[in-house]
Image (tube, rainbow, N blue to C red):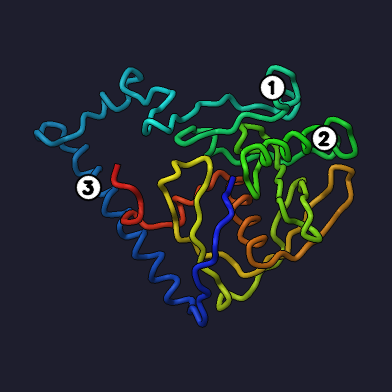
Amino acid sequence: MILSMSLIFQIEGLSMSSSRRRFLHSSSDLVALVTTVVATTVHPNRSWGIDMDSILDPSTTLKHPFVYSADWTGTKLPLLTLEQALQAENIQPRGQWKMGRWPDPILRRPATKVDSRWLATSSLQTACELLQRTAQAEGAVGLAAQQCAVDARLLYLEKGGDRHPVVMVNPHIIGRSPETQVMAWEEQCLVLPPTFVATVLRDAWVDVAYTTWQGQQRKVRLYGEASRCVQHELDHDRGILVTDHVGLEELESD
């Protein structure tokens, strides 16, 4: 789920090599961190070592709800099939789904493709309406059903085909702008604490193929904010967060 963002700048002439250098720099930081952890775990007798038995002990694992701050408590939502998500007990009073909040493990689980048997059914129509109402209630310009612990590849965009709201079934990118037209955006996410802001590179435009709930096959080219939005939501659809797009030095220290 994403908030409306402003474009920072457009990177002209970004070469593959410079892009790779940034990626490798971030990767080297991660490797260094992992190396440090391994070094501390293979020598448990050292005073600064990590006791792997205590790490694997269930009594020491993270408990939920996780309180990040006075204004932020994480969730631990159960995974719902599309059938379960339509049951009354899983729908909030205002006719919407509950949204996951970091560090909920459900946010890392890729969604399952919607089976063709659901197409052109009133049940799928209801699911699409629930997703749209949830997004609108949360003030989001985009939302993936995966963010609500619903195991279905459904994606809502406030401005989709013809700049109108749309719910896409099984969306996927089939074309994208040249890498030299990559654009940088400041992004936040409603499943993450509001203090976190990431600078993320996105394709200037993307071609997306999807199915409507009625079973019609559609293709649309999205530009600018709509392009950024659909890329952000498709990341969620695969269990990817904006935190995965930044280096360790950009993450909050706690």
In front of the other: 210 or 194: 194
Residue at the disc numbered 3:
36
Amino acid at circle 3: Thr
Identify the residue shown where x is 42% and y is 33%. 71
Identify the residue shown where x is 66% and y is 30%. 97
Q: Secondary structure at mark 2?
A: helix
- Tag 1 and tag 3, C-beta contact below 8 Å: no
Total tally of numbered discs in the picture: 3
Q: Secondary structure at mark 3?
A: helix
Comparing marks 2 and 1, which lies closer to the viewer? 1
Position in image of residue 184 (x %, y %): 51, 67
* 74 up-or-down from 203: above or below: above
Tell me which corner region of the image, top left, top right, bottom left or bottom right, holds residue 239: top right
State which tag comes first along the sequence, 3 or 2.
Answer: 3
> Spatial distance from mark 2 to mark 1, Cα to Cα?
20 Å
In front of the other: 176 or 249: 249
Position in image of residue 24 (x %, y %): 37, 65
* 221 up-or-down from 2: above or below: below
Residue at the disc numbered 2:
124
- Point out the image quarter for the C terminus: top left
Tell me which corner region of the image, top left, top right, bottom left or bottom right, holds residue 26: bottom left
Residue located farthest toward the bottom when viewing the structure as drawn: 13
- Check disc 1: other Cα within 10 Å, few if <14, some if 14-19, many if 20+: few
Residue at the disc numbered 1:
93
